Structure formats: C-alpha cells, structure tokens
Amino acid sequence: MAAMIDDIALSTTDPMTDETRWARVLARDEASDGAFVYAVASTGVYCRPSCPSRRPARDKVSFFALPGLAEAAGYRACKRCRPADAKARDPRLKAVGRALAAIAASDNGTPTLAALAKIANLSPHYLQRLFTDLVGLSPRRYGEALRLGRLKENLRNGGGVADALYGAGYGSSSRLYEKAPKHLGMTPATYAKGGKGAAIAFATASSPLGRLLVAATDKGVAMVALGDDDRTLENELKREFPLARLMRDRGRLAGHVENVLARLAGKKTSAALPLDVRATAFQGRVWRALQEIPAGETRSYGAIAEMIGRPGAARAVGRACALNPVAVVVPCHRAVGNAGALTGYRWGVERKRKLLATEREAGRKKRA
C-alpha cells in the first residue's frame, strides 16, 4: 500500500462489530452503504457493502468508517460500486469527513486545528477528540502520515526526489532527510521506485512452520516471512521492494536464519537481530510492547493498547500487528482477541497456534 498509516480503521467506540459488518457485506446490504466501506488487501480496492463484486476471503478484509480513511491507507475506490460517492449518515462522520477532505486538499502542510474546526463546524477541542476517536490519529499526525504516503507513492511512480518531495507537500527537504531512515528505512533517493539501488540479500530455509524467508540490508533484517513455498515468499519480497537488487545469499544470512529458526523452536536467543524496518511512531510502540511479552504468553489487543498508553485503540493495535514485516522477531503471534481468541495472523492462524504451543512447551521443559 502506498501509505503506511497505522491506525485509521474503525474506532473501537463504534457499536457495530466487524462480524456484523461482514454479515452485511455478505448480504450486500444496501442500507449499510454510507455507514462504512470494506477494503480487500489482495486487490487494494475498497467497496460499498452492497457492491455486486465477488466476495473476498474474510481474512483479507478490513473496514473503514469513511472512504477517505481507506484511501489514506492506500486502497483505491472500486469502479463498479463507486464507494466514494456514498454519503455517511452519522453527522459525526460527516464533520470528520470535512476535516479529512481539507487535510487531503492542503498543499502546504496540515491546516491548523482552528481552521479545521471552522470547516467541520465544531469547537477545536471537540474536533480534536472526535477526530482522534474515529480516525485513531490526531489531525496533525494524520496529515503527516498522509503526506508521507504521498511521498512514497510519488517515489514509487518514478518521480525525481525533489518533485516527489514538493508534490507531497513538503516545503523543505532538510527535516524530511533527517527523519527518512526512520520512516522509509532508507533515504528518499534509495526508496524511490521500490528501493532502486538498494541491495537486499535473502535466504530461504525449511522450518517447523513451513518455508522461511529472511531478507536483510546492510543495516539489518528487513523481512522475516513464513509460507508454503519459496516462490510465494520471494514474490512477497519483490512486491515490497520491486526495484531493489535482490540477491539470494544463504551464506551471508546464515547467522540470521539460525537465529530465527531458534526462535521458531521456542529457544531463547542471546543474540539480538538488528532490524531495518519502516514503522510509524504508533507501530514502533506496538512492536516494542510485543517484544516485552514473555514467550508462550499472550496479551489481548486491548491490553497491548493500554501498555502503550492508548486505551481504546485495540483495533489500531491489530492493524499494527498485521503490518509487522518481521515474523517471530517482533512476536505479533502473542497478540490475541478477547478471551484469548486466536484471531487473524499474517502468516496463518494455524502457525500462530503452533508457535504459541511450541513456546509454552519450551517454557515447561525449562521449568521442569
């Protein structure tokens, strides 16, 4: 996806559950048009609930309160059902929608809170609270994330760095370059067009959970993925860095591969893996919290949200887990739903179940 906005799905304060939304999508419920849209990870498209298109697999679907939020997450509108034309019924969503539109239309950074409040016809304090509740980000952080998403898209589309920078609304290059390694994992020039010029070594191996892929730059591990076959894993790596120079190099990555295999076997490793991954501030907090959960134990998305000081952001935590590019190293398998339910996992729920069982068994043997 073009934008790496970490927490823009529906707020947990919304009384409708995802399962209710999914039931309405399956029923092609026209009455739900305007109440939410659903987005499909495998196609990059978002739709109205009543869209006549073929229904995707449930684990590929996420829900958004507004079309603008789906677009900010990198999805594009379906050409069949034209979801961007749907009108939100909730007046709160309409007010926030006006603020979202104003932020998206601004060419000179995010408008001030006072200006947005005037557009939304709300007080600044109420708009700040409502916007953060519904979107999961403050107006300022949403604007920053949207601008960064535009920069990434411009770079991937082949624009020069200067044109991409100013086209995304950055008035100066200095601050962007200072923060670029944190947000992009590399400088804008290197990130341009899918990491053109970047050298990424990768290796695959058999593991207790199927095939394993480990990829790394000179700075650290950029991807750890699990799958059924090497071809699928390599294609996933190519989608993330389509123009990077990818090199199979098992010898160079032998230590990293052994480290990950040890983790998959439930063994405690003394060697920390250096990482070279892109993350927003919110994602970084979630990923650090996941690494603090003891092996074999789990925490609910809501509990993790409280750990990072964002109570009520359980859905945003779930999305941060779904975007984790380094399986096991950042142990998102330790995040579960309410009452310990093993909800979605990027590399399959059954792998999640086996990982937790392996960690618990290793813990029992250690205590025995």
Image: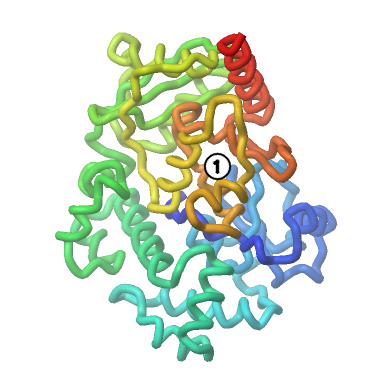
Left or right, 103 with respect to 58, comes to left
Residue 76: image location, x then y, percent: 54, 58
Q: Residue furthest right?
A: 27
Q: Nearer the viewer, residue 294 or 290?
A: 294
Q: Residue at x 70, y 35 (%)?
A: 342
- Residue 11 seen: yes
Front-lying residue, 75 or 279: 279
For the point 53% across and 56% down, the residue is 75
Locate the C terminus by quadrant: top right
Where residue 158 appears, as percent x and y from the top left, is 29, 50
**Label 1: which secondary element:** helix
How far from the left and from the top, in percent, is residue 82?
64, 67
Q: Residue at x 62, y 76 (%)?
A: 93
Q: Is residue 295 above or below residue 25?
A: above
Q: Is residue 166 left or right of residue 232?
A: left
| Kind of residue indicated by mark 1 | Ala
Which residue position is annotated with label 1?
322
